[in-house]
RNA sequence: CGGGGCGUAGCGUAGCCUGGUAACGCGCCUGCUUUGGGAGCAGGAGUUCGCUGGUUCAAAUCCAGCCGCCCCGACCA
């Protein structure tokens, strides 16, 4: 009889992708539900992933000349209302603090849904001269948006993110900054999360409330839906105007600066799960895996594993640590070997290192890859060189596999019928022409649930509109998370 | 916000229709035997049944209101 496995069961992806995702998040102990809808608890294993992402992203943000700061959580209502489009876009999802110290406040305070209002108001005080520019500030913070439908990591009421807010003298500089950060995001998710993304500009209907232009990176998930993984906005002079930011330029003229903002969030964790995971659970890219290798010591048939196996395992752990590998030794004695195999597979650890009496006799260990379970015997003597190499290979294989999936699930269509058929059956990205009319965009969304994820960068590629047949440009469609 | 489902031990559930002292599996604790793919046996601990109120001699069960979670839809920089 098959033993009961209630705790460990994960719904197969093909049965119910949504349920699979939730099972993985909960059972791999990335997150747990909190008492308030949409407010999740990020557990240590999930938070370790976030910390690894943060560390790398933070380095990239600083390398491109930005510094970190921290602005307040609470934003006065009047601040939020200064930019019309912005408040219209965000007020439906704002949470308000109206009571403080037991007394009704004179002015309600919004819990920040984003910090443009707060930060631009501050910048108005800081900027007097062209010599004060550019301002290149990033903050790591939590924000709150009262979402109607929430899912761990993908769309939560409270989430963690970084938001960059910059000011520039010219439109060109602001545009350059916007695109530079989009590039930082793209290389981060591809190099670190092994998640290939499409980058491009959003249509007006999809752009940020109050922005001049919004750019985004879009990844394709295992179920054929797209996930926006990061955005970068050229805010034009709208916010400078609304928040009264002015300075004297080199010609002694009183002018407004150009601003940008850009952000990535814990949502990327959800994207990474849905990009790489399989029916056995998570698969983590080595670069952000809390444990890159887990040593599973195998006890001898007769006798105590403390005699030979465990001491050797500790030695191997030390050896790999010295080589800069994040390695965990699973010396729990309450679980059997098979249980540990399944457990670490579910948690997505890239390599399992099996070490038993037979291996020790041969001065070797066996490394097992998480994604295909292939086993490689490796001499203990060469581990510190072999393992980093295998990790690098694993990382690039993950990216390759995801790239192939994206390519295999991108369809160029020439007729609207074909569009509808592909979107109903296979989904994925659809490349098609669009005449630039928001009404057409809306109709497509209503009829197929697909939206324009991005307009590709560079000069528009001419293509007949898939709906009207009129002259248009090539854009990328998908159903979105 | 509309439609549907659900809330009983840490987790998964039965019991509810037809009211009568709360049950099963996993997990947890102790001991022994095991251990190269999710161990076995024995003994134990743990639930005022989402909340509030009502009906009743008696409520997990019937009634009302509320709260929360999940799915579908609408909405979602």
Image (cartoon, coloured by chain):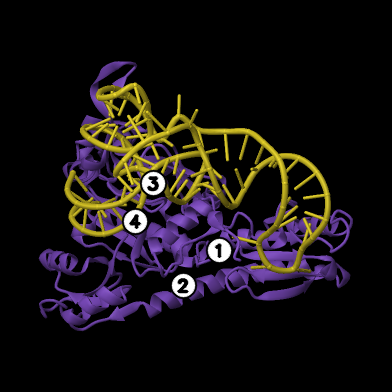
> Color used for chain A?
purple
Query: Where does the image place residue A263, in percent across and percent down from the top left?
Result: 38, 51
SS at badge 3: strand
SS at badge 1: loop
Q: Name the subunit of mark 2.
A: A
**Comes first in the chain, label 4 or label 3:** 3
What is the distance, in whole Å, between disc 1 and disc 4 at their CAs? 22 Å
Residue depicted at 60% across the width and 63% down the height: A345
Q: Which residue does the numbered mark 1 point to in the structure image?
A: A285
B56 and A479: which is toward the camera: B56
Query: Where does the image place residue A255, in percent across and percent down from the top left?
Result: 22, 43
Q: Which residue does the numbered mark 3 point to in the structure image?
A: A163
Q: Say whether residue A316 is left or right of residue A289.
A: right
Q: Which residue does the numbered mark 4 point to in the structure image?
A: A231
**Comes first in the chain, label 3 or label 1:** 3
The relative height of residue A206 versus residue A443 in the rendered view (above or below) is above
Q: Which label sits in the foreground, 2 or 3?
A: 2
Q: Which residue does the numbered mark 2 point to in the structure image?
A: A402
Residue depicted at 41% across the width and 40% down the height: A142
Query: Where does the image place residue A317, in percent across and percent down from the top left?
Result: 76, 57
**Comes first in the chain, label 2 or label 4:** 4
What is the distance, in whole Å, between disc 3 and disc 1 at their CAs? 24 Å
Residue depicted at 75% across the width and 51% down the height: A333
Q: Name the subunit of mark 3.
A: A
SS at badge 4: strand
The relative height of residue A4 versus residue B66 in the rendered view (above or below) is below
């Amino acid at each position: 009889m098959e033993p009961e496995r209630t705790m460990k069961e994960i719904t197969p992806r093909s049965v119910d992708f949504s349920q699979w995702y939730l099972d993985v998040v909960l059972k791999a102990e990335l997150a747990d539900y909190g008492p308030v809808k949409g407010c999740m608890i990020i557990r240590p294993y999930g938070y370790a992933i976030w910390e690894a992402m943060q560390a790398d992203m933070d380095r990239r943000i600083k390398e491109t000349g930005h510094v970190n700061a921290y602005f307040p959580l609470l934003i006065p209502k009047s601040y939020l209302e200064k930019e019309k489009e912005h408040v219209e876009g965000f007020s439906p999802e704002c949470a308000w603090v109206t009571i403080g110290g037991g007394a009704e406040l004179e002015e309600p305070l919004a819990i920040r849904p984003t910090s443009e209002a707060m930060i631009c108001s501050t910048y108005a005080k800081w900027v007097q001269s062209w010599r004060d520019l550019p301002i290149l500030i990033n903050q790591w913070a939590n924000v709150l948006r009262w979402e109607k439908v929430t899912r761990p990591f993908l769309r939560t009421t409270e989430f963690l993110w970084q938001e960059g807010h910059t000011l520039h003298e010219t439109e060109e500089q602001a545009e350059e900054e916007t695109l530079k950060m989009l590039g930082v995001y793209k290389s981060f998710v591809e190099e670190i999360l092994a998640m290939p993304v499409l980058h491009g500009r959003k249509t007006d209907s999809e752009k940020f409330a109050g922005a001049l232009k919004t750019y985004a990176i879009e990844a394709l998930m295992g179920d054929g839906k797209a996930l926006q993984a990061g955005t970068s906005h050229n805010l034009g002079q709208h916010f400078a105007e609304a928040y009264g930011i002015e300075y004297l330029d080199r010609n002694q003229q009183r002018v407004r600066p150009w601003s940008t903002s850009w952000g990535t969030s814990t949502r990327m964790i959800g994207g990474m799960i849905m990009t790489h995971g399989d029916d056995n659970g998570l698969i983590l890219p080595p670069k952000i895996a809390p444990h890159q290798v887990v040593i599973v010591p195998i006890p001898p048939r007769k006798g105590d594993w403390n005699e030979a196996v465990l001491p050797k395992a500790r030695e191997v752990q030390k050896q790999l640590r010295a080589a800069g590998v994040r390695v965990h030794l699973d010396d729990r004695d309450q679980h059997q070997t098979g249980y540990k195999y399944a457990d670490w597979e579910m948690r997505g650890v890239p390599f399992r290192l099996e070490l038993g009496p037979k291996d020790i006799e041969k001065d070797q260990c066996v490394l097992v890859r998480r994604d295909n379970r292939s086993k490689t015997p490796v001499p203990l003597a060469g581990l510190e060189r072999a393992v980093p190499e295998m990790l690098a290979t694993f990382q690039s294989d993950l990216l390759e596999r995801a790239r192939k999936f994206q390519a295999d699930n991108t369809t160029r269509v020439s007729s609207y019928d074909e569009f509808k058929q592909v979107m109903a059956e296979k989904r994925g990205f659809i490349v098609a022409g669009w005449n630039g009319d928001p009404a057409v965009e809306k109709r497509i969304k209503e009829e197929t649930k697909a939206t324009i994820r991005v307009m590709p960068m560079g000069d528009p590629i001419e293509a007949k509109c898939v709906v009207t047949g009129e002259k248009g440009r090539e854009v990328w469609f998908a159903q979105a998370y």
